[in-house]
Amino acid sequence: MSSIIARAALALSRGLPPLLALALPFFAALACFAGSVALADALPLRATGQVGKPARTSNIRVRATDEDAVVEARLGSRRVEATLPVPDAIDASVETHRLAGGRALTIVRVRNEAGREAFVLIGARGGRPEVLFTGHLDLRGDPGERRRDVIEVQDRTGDGAADIIVGVELESTRICGQDRTLLNPRAVDPGTGALRPVELRRLPADGDEVAVEAASASPGPEGPPLLGGVSFSQASSSVGGPEDPGLVSPPSGLGDDDPATHWAEGHGGAGRWEFATARLEGRGDLRALAITLAAAPIVRPSHLWLVGDAGPRLRVTIPPAAAAGAIVWVVPPESLSWRCLSVVLDDAAEAGAVGLAGVAVYGDLDFGDGLGRLVEELVADGPRGARAAEVLSRAGAPARDAVIEAWPTLTPTGRRRAIRVLSSHTDHPAAVEALAEAAADPDGAVQDAAVEALVAIGPRAVPALGRLASVPTEGGDRAAVALVAVAPNDARAPLLAAIDAEGGADRPGLRRALRSAYRETNGEDRERYAEWARGAAPGPAAAAALALAKAGDVGASIAASLVARGITNATRFEDVYRLVTAAYHLPSDPAVDAWLRGLVADSDAWMLRSQSMLALGARRSPRLREAARGALEDAYPRVRLAAAIVVAGQEGTLRAVSTLARRDPWPMVRAGATEALAEASGALPVLRAAAGDRSKRVRAAAVRALTTRRERSAADVVAGRLEDADEWPMVIEAAIAYASELCVPALVDPLVTVLRRGLRPDAWAPDIDSAVLAIGALRDLGGPDAAAAIRSATSERAPGPIRAAAVRAQEQLESPDSHGNQGRCTASPAD
């Protein structure tokens, strides 16, 4: 009897199911058996192989289709066919192997140019060829979930004959520290020719290992781990589960802290080498494990291994006297920095489904004052503090209470990290209150983090956010905005109370929140706003008017009523300014227009005169020209500028605005008046003259105005700006934009002049920047001269930014869509 059959007989004598017990070390006889191997040949392929016992010749044919490869094996008049998932296969190989006792099998491998590879294992019984197994050898599926089939030909029994093993490898299911773990291994029985389950050693025999005796006494912890149970997500098999390892359910019963649940292997026998794996990220070093033994009919193991992703594995002996349901403790000789844990079964005292009821992992947090030490680390720099926050956020109510108690002693960095911990406990009122206090913290980053956490809580945070909204700080403003985001219909009362409070009218964030809340309400709730408006004090009323005027049509009516009341009783500068700004966003009406006209004429504050002038213009008030007559001669420049902006282009104002553009002593006013005349009839002489103004600001404004009115007749003026070597970059930039937007061919040479200034060896940075812009304009204008200038700028001697811009421009001009050297302007001339 062959050694394989002898081992099967031994397994049967121990009362195990009929499986082949090939539990031999990996290092034993790893020589691969080539048998009769043919090199890969192109398809279609005709070859022969040996199958059956005694071995007989089988004719093999392999052909390719667009979707797969078809392998046909004939034995006399009988045939069998297998379809392999390899589209557009290019070649195949055929190899024969003999097992102990003389049984022959043939393996056909097929591959394509894309790296897809598959195989079929062919045998014969009773004179009939049969397909024993097909599989794909390349990884397929989504990253992290990919799988492939495996076929191994090795002497695993040491009898000098080949053993053929097939199985599956899953990226998602493996023993910690291993790149791959063979699952559901089956071997060809030399006697019957069928595939049978086998036990294969999954841990190296010479691996670093420490023996540990499990004990019934706890090394210190009482109760479950503070970080809760670990999540076992992978298992090699499960009792009653599917044979396909990819369909095995996660062994969640191992980590759920429920002794009534369990995981038991589904391979049979003593369950040796079956395993379950959990991830341990974020738990810190492992100091102890508590193993809960399962009750009958689950068989408890006598020994098992605990394997991590680094360091020695632990071979654990379970006390024989430990009863079902008992907890036994495993304490490694030193703490283990494992981020992965595999429980690998070894042997059991009896046959049956072997398993465990639970595995709990204890770390530093569970020993002594672990919580206190971890809270202290919240203030640590770098990853230590971040790790402490991550661990504490999963450590349950004790961590929450410890963080709240330590809050006054924490640094701003520690408080920011503590908010992360509190955010994981917002189902408890104490955590919500602590976050509310944090939202009023002196540190802005702490405030932001706390408010964000409160927003995430939702409606339960409304009372806390409402209280915070009344605090006249940036944190209070953030809370007000957050309150509207969480519950706009509940925000009215706390927001109006906050704006009524001292300092509330001066809070921009509160005004933004009020505007957002009003937009989100309707009907009865808006009437509540109107009731408040009818009795509001001048300061809050002006602030609300400004907020609601910016809400668009939805807020126009209530804002107009607030402005109408405010102009009769507002005296504080801030309140009057807010009313003027609110009026800017509202339609014209006689009373408010008259009030604005009066401010332009009589207010001592230039800001009110200027803003009132702009408001009259925005409202298109009939009082506009009347107010502008005096404002155009106001002593303060910003008032004159506001008047010029709002009346330029209106009938009868050209002379007055042109006077400002030419003669005002302030460049700011001359520039603003010049640009305001961009579309005014009869303003061209003023704009041409302004292009030569002594102020660069005015010259740039003049060129922009000429561009706006698309005044191509002023190209000579713009050319002068481009050719002036002393011109300022802001004017050059405006002139280049004029040339490009208006497509003026006459400006090619002036643009080349700008480019050459940037190419000089001593060019300063602004000249280089202008040259880059000039290249873009030359590309748009196109033509031989522009193309030649761009080509010259591709020289290795050109500054890097210019050369890069020139290369891009040249590629665009030479592309098929550019029609030779035609640029955008040449292909589509400007009007």
Image: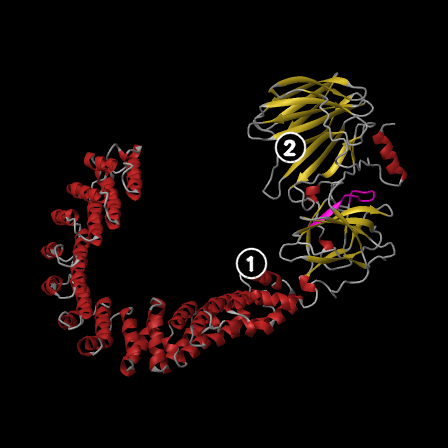
Between discs 2 and 1, the one toward the N terminus: 2
* Foreground label between 2 and 1: 1
Compute the Cα span from label 2 to label 1: 41 Å
Residue nearer the viewer, 526 or 596: 596
Q: Looking at the image, how many numbered discs can be counted on the residues?
A: 2
Q: Is residue 622 magenta?
A: no
Q: Is residue 747 above or below residue 482?
A: above
Q: Amino acid at mark 1?
A: Pro
Numbered tag placed on residue 208 in the rendering: none
Part of the protein shown in magenta? 266-277
Give the percent coordinates (x, y) of residue 522.
42, 70
Residue of label 1:
383
Q: Is residue 390 above or below residue 97?
A: below
Q: Is residue 618 left or right of residue 197?
A: left
Q: Amino acid at mark 2?
A: Leu
The part of the image, by quadrant, that contains residue 151 is top right
The part of the image, by quadrant, that contains residue 619 is bottom left
Residue name at image x 30 percent, y 37 percent: 807
Residue name at image x 70 percent, y 67 percent: 368
Residue of label 2:
137
Q: Is residue 308 visible?
A: yes
